[in-house]
Image (tube, rainbow, N blue to C red):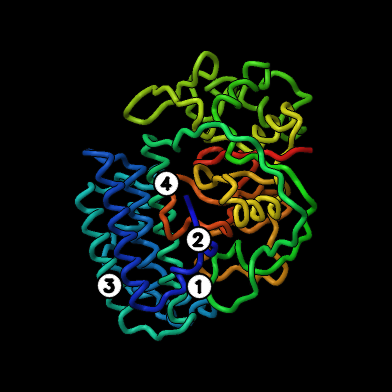
Amino acid sequence: MPTSADSNAVARAGRDGLSVALLDARNHLLQALAAFGEPVPNAALRLALAAAWYQEHWISRHVQRSRGPACDPAGVRLAGVEPRIGLWLAPAADTAEPATPDSASVRSYLVQTLEITLDLLASAAEDDAALHFYRQALLHEDRLVEALAVLLQRAAPAARAQRAPLWLPAQRVQLGTQEAGWRVHNEQGLLIADVPEFEIDAQAVNWQQFSEFAADGGYDRAPWWSSEGWQWLQAFDATADGSRRAPRHVAQLKNGVLVQRGSLGLVRAAPGQAAMHVSRHEAQAWCCWAGRRLPTEAEWQAAATTAASRGFVWGDVFEWVAGRARAWPGARPSAPGCLDVGPHAESPCGVLRGASFATLPRRRSSSARRFMPAGHDQALMGFRSCSI
């Protein structure tokens, strides 16, 4: 179970710590590629290429890399080690050549780019500006390792015995921080929130609980859905896949949950596993059906940081929380090379908290937050609920 309270601690390390972490991230990425066997799917190769390209684009080719956030993102760049990388990463329809090379070429590119990155890191200054892009590259590769696990689609969270919800007292919660130094963009800024007493699930909603919603006509009754959620659900009727009656990758929800697990085919999911690939629309509909609600960010973080000894478990899946995505007060503008989607009115996003079973240990933090559209369901995402 995660115990870290700060997902930025490793990335704030100096040159030596970053060097070790970057090597570790690359080893995890190569292991993830090997898990696919040969031939490696193009989608997996493109994810691996993105890790190497990011290091090249923002570090080895970027002459202003030492300026960090103050650099000119459109400034002059040096030639790269692989002239075909633009063709390899371009959409297949835009090129006359294959969208991706063979796996041996990808691995060679990974080796070359990492060697250059580590050489440059060894002579970088020990300050936040000079180390900014190395920290960003580490975050990027850690997330790509997670994305490869999603693409492989073989593993699942642990099955857990059902535990009673927890009652937490009123408290003051700090969200974010005003500490100087590099931070994941979505976790910058500071908000102090006063949280009244509340009841919250001890663990994420599991397949047994979610299947009861579906069996009770959960996907057929508009009153349980928000207006946006109902429109999202009805839009599936016009797609080639037809109507949606379960989360992504689920082939059956009644009489046992059958889930597509990549090359393993259909696998029976344990009832006590956290429901996964659940959109925010589905999470809200389940809560309405159950007479409950999604927790606020402050409630979720209060429970994650104070109730572990009482049985509060997080980290099986990323968890949707209430409210739309917003930056904390005092957050800095996004820096060049930023990996996070900023909240904006034209495309409102929801917030995911915590981590998933595929998140590397250095990224498993109660402070972690990501922004995703409410209809997104590709990541390892689920939810828990609070009493109304």
Q: Is residue 178 above or below residue 50?
A: below
Residue 142: where, in percent of width, then height?
A: 41, 57
SS type, badge 3: helix
| Cα distance between the residues tagged 4 and 1 | 31 Å
Secondary structure beneath disc 4? loop
Q: Is residue 161 left or right of residue 264?
A: right
Residue under pointer 1: 73
> In the rendered structure, are the residues bearing label 2 and label 3 in contact, judged by CB atoms less than 8 Å apart?
no
Give the residue drawn at x 23%, y 48%: 103
Q: Are marks 1 and 3 in contact (CB under 8 Å)?
A: no
User: Mark 2 against mark 1, which lies toward the viewer?
Assistant: 2
From the viewer's side, name the closer residue of 190 and 195. 195
Q: Dot 1: within a 10 Å radius of its alpha carbon, few (fewer than 14), some, or many (20 or more) residues?
A: some
Residue nearest the viewer, comparing 67 with 129: 129
Q: With 104 as the anchor, is 145 left or right in this view?
A: right
Amino acid type, label 1: Pro
Residue of label 3: 116
Kindly report the distance in space between the C-alpha atoms of the residues bearing marks 2 and 1: 33 Å
Q: Earlier in the sequence, mark 2 or mark 1?
A: 2
Q: Could you tell me how far apart the alpha carbons at marks 4 and 3 are, in whole angstroms?
A: 28 Å
Identity, as a three-letter code, of the amino acid under mark 4: Ala
Residue position marked by numbered label 4 in the rendering: 358
Residue 202, horizontal then vertical, whole percent: 61, 41
Q: Does 14 appear above or below 338?
A: below
Give how far apart the Cα atoms at labels 2 and 4 are.
16 Å
Q: Report the quarter where the C terminus lies.
A: top right
What amino acid is at disc 2? Ser
Instruction: Give the residue number, with chain letter if any, for mark 2.
Output: 4
Verify CB contact (< 8 Å) between mark 2 and mark 1. no
Which comes before the other along the chain, label 4 or label 1? Answer: 1
